Image (cartoon, rainbow, N blue to C red):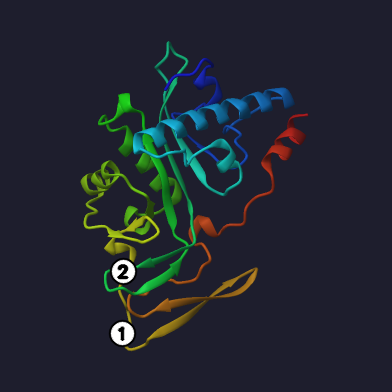
């Protein structure tokens, strides 16, 4: 997807990560330049969100600049830096974030979890089946340190299910009533079938946090996020950037 402005001047790398402040990585400039960059990032997000919704047959986008601004989600944006006469083009996006969910395994056992989720995934129609989706997805997995089987997928299309089957061997999805999909590997196997439930304690500087595990599969049932999703949200970065660059 091409834009009137130079995408390459806005985003310096082939894949960039945008969070709630909508500030492009590596930004440097004054207040006016900051707001101009944020407006351009918003235009990119909204345009790609609209295209993704249209491709999935949705009545409205699930990815917008306003939604990202008011969340702790991350948006990975993929670029073709050679396109549009050297100004660059946006070819894909992938949104992730933790969600509090109730999920069921194949035996009907339910769990309350906050797993990392794939919330929106789109490669521009003109660039599909060229390996760009795999490139973007692999980048996300590396950045977030997660296996595909440990993620919950929100409203996956048949194309996305086929993508996960082809590249990661994920098949026979366990479809949930909340429109999410997980796979059998999402549920860990029990290490002690004799104990119905165990409680682990996370000794952290903030205090001791109890985590329940069900012995049926050892799946953590705490509603607290884990991994990078458990990190505290940083203070508003826009104010920090303004203060730094003024």
Q: Position of residue 154 (x, y in %)?
A: 39, 51
**Residue shown at 52%/47% (left/top)?**
73
Residue with the mark numbered 2:
105
**Residue shown at 60%/42% (left/top)?**
69
Say which element carries label 1. Answer: loop
Q: Is residue 215 above or below residue 163?
A: below
Disc nearer the start of the sequence (1/2):
2
Label 1 to label 2, Cα distance in Å? Answer: 17 Å
Q: Toward the viewer: 82 or 46?
A: 46
Q: Position of residue 46 (x, y in %)?
A: 51, 31
Q: Is residue 186 above or below residue 90?
A: below
Q: Residue furthest bottom?
A: 194
Q: Is residue 8 above or below residue 143?
A: above
**Residue shown at 67%/41% (left/top)?**
237
Examine the rendering and report whether any part of residue 114 can be seen.
yes
Classed neighbour count for the residue bearing mark 2: other residues with Cα under 10 Å, few (<14), some (14–19), many (≥20): some
Name the quadrant containing residue 121: top left
Q: In the drawing, what numbered circle is on residue 193?
A: 1
Classed neighbour count for the residue bearing mark 1: other residues with Cα under 10 Å, few (<14), some (14–19), many (≥20): few
Q: Is residue 95 above or below residue 98?
A: above
Q: Nearer the viewer, mark 1 or mark 2?
A: 2
Q: Looking at the figure, which quarter contains the N terminus?
A: top left
Asked if labels 2 and 1 touch by Cβ distance under 8 angstroms, the answer is no
Q: Residue furthest top?
A: 85
20 left or right of 118?
right
Q: Looking at the figure, which quarter contains the C terminus?
A: top right
Q: Toward the viewer: 72 or 56?
A: 56
Q: In the drawing, what numbered circle is on residue 150?
A: none
**Residue shown at 41%/71% (left/top)?**
111
């Amino acid at each position: 997807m091409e834009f009137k402005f130079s995408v390459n001047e806005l985003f310096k790398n082939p894949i960039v990560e945008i969070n709630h402040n909508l500030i492009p990585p590596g930004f440097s400039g004054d207040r006016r330049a900051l707001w101009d960059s944020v407006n351009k990032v918003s235009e990119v997000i909204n345009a790609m969100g609209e295209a993704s919704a249209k491709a999935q047959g949705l009545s409205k986008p699930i990815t917008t600049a306003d939604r990202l601004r008011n969340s702790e989600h991350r948006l990975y944006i993929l670029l073709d830096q050679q396109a549009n006469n050297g100004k660059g083009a946006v070819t894909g996006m992938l949104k992730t974030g933790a969600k509090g969910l109730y999920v069921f395994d194949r035996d009907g056992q339910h769990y309350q979890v906050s797993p990392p989720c794939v919330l929106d995934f789109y490669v521009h129609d003109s660039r599909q089946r060229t390996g760009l989706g795999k490139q973007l997805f692999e980048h996300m997995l590396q950045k977030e340190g997660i296996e595909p089987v440990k993620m919950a997928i929100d409203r996956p299309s048949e194309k996305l299910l086929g993508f996960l089957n082809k590249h990661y061997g994920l098949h026979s999805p366990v479809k949930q009533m909340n429109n999410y999909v997980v796979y059998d590997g999402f549920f860990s196997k029990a290490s002690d079938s004799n104990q119905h439930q165990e409680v682990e304690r996370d000794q952290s500087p903030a205090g001791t946090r109890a985590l329940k595990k069900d012995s049926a599969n050892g799946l953590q049932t705490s509603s607290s996020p884990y991994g990078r999703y458990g990190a505290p949200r940083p203070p508003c970065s826009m104010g920090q950037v303004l203060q730094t660059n003024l």
